Image (cartoon, helix red, strand yellow):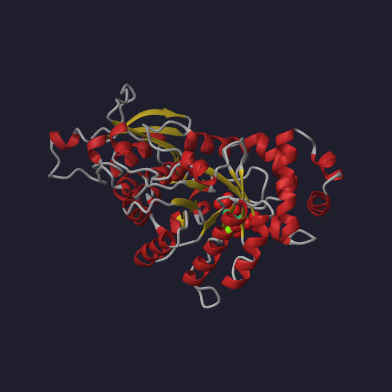
């Protein structure tokens, strides 16, 4: 049965997926495209007796094949509203393993309005992040505690006061810090949020601590509840290792917290340009299930991802999406003060800039690291070159000497 209709024009009731497709040797592009449309909608490898005209109408349609880019329209009825797992099991499921394809990459999904509106989206979005922090006219400056594992809650507590009071707005746990012998979640949350309150009483600044609640769902709910009880404004989750269903359940609780989304493991899906799932798809899914802020790449840091890709992701997170709240992009990975003006010019104001090694590795001290970061942003905002600004700012000077 035909899944190819190059004359078809998708309607507003179609979900449209774009794929990069390379067929296996001996298979035509058209045949491979047809197999994908079948397997990801209603079909299988052979005609079945239970097929009917009514069911045939639900079949996906390949409506464009240009070079290796294939576009497929799926009737909205194929999908359960509010069920991201089911949607991905269809359009990003079995098809990646089919023998007919050599490579397949899901580049983008254009959801229908009805499907987008069936998801809750962020409870706390970009605008509320601005309101909570009271910082509007510059990027927020964040840090990841390093070493990524091993510090005790007490050590983090001491360092947290140092870095917040030297200009850091946002401190997060690393993605693999959960609740281990050397650092139990409960004690860490108590101590760290105590520092957040101290900074508020000392300076009137509302700084953020993003404790990583990642774990089994029951534990995540307990940890989020504790953060709420302690007055914390944010929870951090590793979106991919935790899974969409768990994220949806967390969102459903209306905890009223910022959800800091770390994307650990994304590159297993996103990195191969010919196969897998694009980061754009992961960003869209993250927004649907209610992430408030999401790691999207740095352009200039240690992680893969160029300016065009990262800018597109950030633009999507901040664009209109059928009225759904916006998501704050996060740049993280290999950043240091020498990169801040470039980053600011490339990615703009609505951004959290995160420094791990680029703060804790400052040659003088973590306090100097925090100050150097703030100085580099001040220079960027004032349009003064780092070299010039460093003449009168010694912490910045030391950072540039080490890293540039
Ligand atoms: C950054 C980081 C983040 C990466 C992940 C790390 O530390 O904590 O996990 O940013 O990449 O462990 O590498 P550094 P992305 O600042 O010391 O590099 O945000 O692109 O997903
Ligand atoms: Mg990390």
Q: State left or right for residue 95 relative to residue 168.
A: left
Indicate whether 395 appears above or below 274.
below
> Foreground residue, 48 or 229?
229
Visible residue check, residue 185: yes
Q: Residue at x 22, y 37 (%)?
A: 77
Q: Where is residue 68 in the image (x, y as percent from the top left)?
A: 47, 34
Q: How many labels does the image show?
A: 0
Q: In which quarter of the image is the N terminus?
A: top left
Q: In the rendering, at what x and y percent does residue 305 appear?
A: 60, 44
Tell me if residue 100 comes above or below residue 357 in the rendering. above
The residue positioned farthest toward the right in the image shown: 391
Asked if residue 174 lies left or right of residue 27, the reply is right
In which quadrant of the rendered view does residue 378 lie? top right
**Is any atom of residue 25 visible in this view?**
no
Q: Residue at x 48, y 69 (%)?
A: 185
Q: Where is residue 343 in the image (x, y as percent from the top left)?
A: 67, 40
Q: Which of 50 and 214 is in front in this view?
A: 214
Judged from the image, the quadrant occupied by ligand 1 is bottom right
Instruction: Give 48 or 257, whichever is nearer the viewer.
Output: 257
């Amino acid at each position: 049965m035909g899944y190819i209709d190059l004359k078809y024009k998708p309607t507003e009731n179609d979900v449209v997926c774009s794929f990069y497709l390379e067929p296996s040797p001996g298979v035509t592009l058209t045949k491979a495209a047809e197999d994908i449309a079948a397997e990801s909608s209603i079909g299988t490898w052979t005609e079945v007796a239970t097929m009917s005209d009514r069911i045939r109408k639900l079949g996906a349609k390949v409506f464009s094949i240009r070079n290796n880019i294939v576009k497929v329209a799926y009737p909205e009825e194929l999908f359960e509203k509010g069920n991201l797992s089911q949607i991905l099991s269809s359009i990003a499921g079995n098809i990646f393993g089919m023998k007919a394809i050599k490579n397949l990459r899901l580049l983008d999904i254009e959801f229908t309005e009805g499907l987008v509106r069936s998801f809750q989206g962020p409870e706390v979005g970009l605008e509320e992040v601005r309101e909570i922090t009271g910082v509007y006219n510059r990027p927020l400056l964040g840090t990841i505690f390093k070493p990524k594992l091993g510090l005790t809650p007490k050590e983090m507590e001491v360092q947290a006061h140092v870095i917040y009071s030297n200009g850091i707005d946002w401190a997060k746990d690393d993605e693999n810090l959960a609740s281990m012998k050397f650092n139990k979640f409960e004690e860490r949350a108590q101590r760290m949020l105590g520092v957040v309150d101290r900074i508020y009483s000392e300076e009137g600044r509302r700084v953020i601590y993003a404790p990583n609640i990642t774990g089994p769902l029951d534990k995540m709910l307990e940890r989020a509840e504790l953060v709420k009880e302690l007055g914390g404004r944010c929870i951090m989750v590793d979106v991919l290792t935790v899974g969409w269903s768990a994220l949806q359940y967390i969102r459903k609780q209306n905890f009223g917290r910022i959800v800091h989304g770390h994307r650990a493991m994304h590159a297993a899906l996103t990195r191969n340009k010919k196969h897998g799932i694009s980061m754009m798809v992961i960003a869209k899914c993250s927004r649907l299930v209610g992430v408030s802020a999401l790691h999207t790449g740095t352009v200039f840091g240690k992680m893969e991802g160029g300016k065009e890709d990262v800018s597109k992701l950030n633009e999507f997170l901040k664009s209109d999406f059928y009225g759904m709240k916006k998501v704050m992009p996060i740049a993280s990975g290999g950043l240091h003060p020498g990169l801040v003006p470039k980053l600011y010019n490339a990615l703009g104001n609505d951004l959290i800039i995160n420094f791990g090694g680029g703060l804790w590795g400052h040659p003088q001290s973590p306090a100097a690291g925090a100050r150097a970061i703030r100085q580099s942003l001040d220079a960027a905002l004032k349009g003064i070159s780092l070299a010039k600004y460093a003449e009168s700012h010694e912490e910045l000077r030391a950072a540039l000497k080490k890293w540039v």
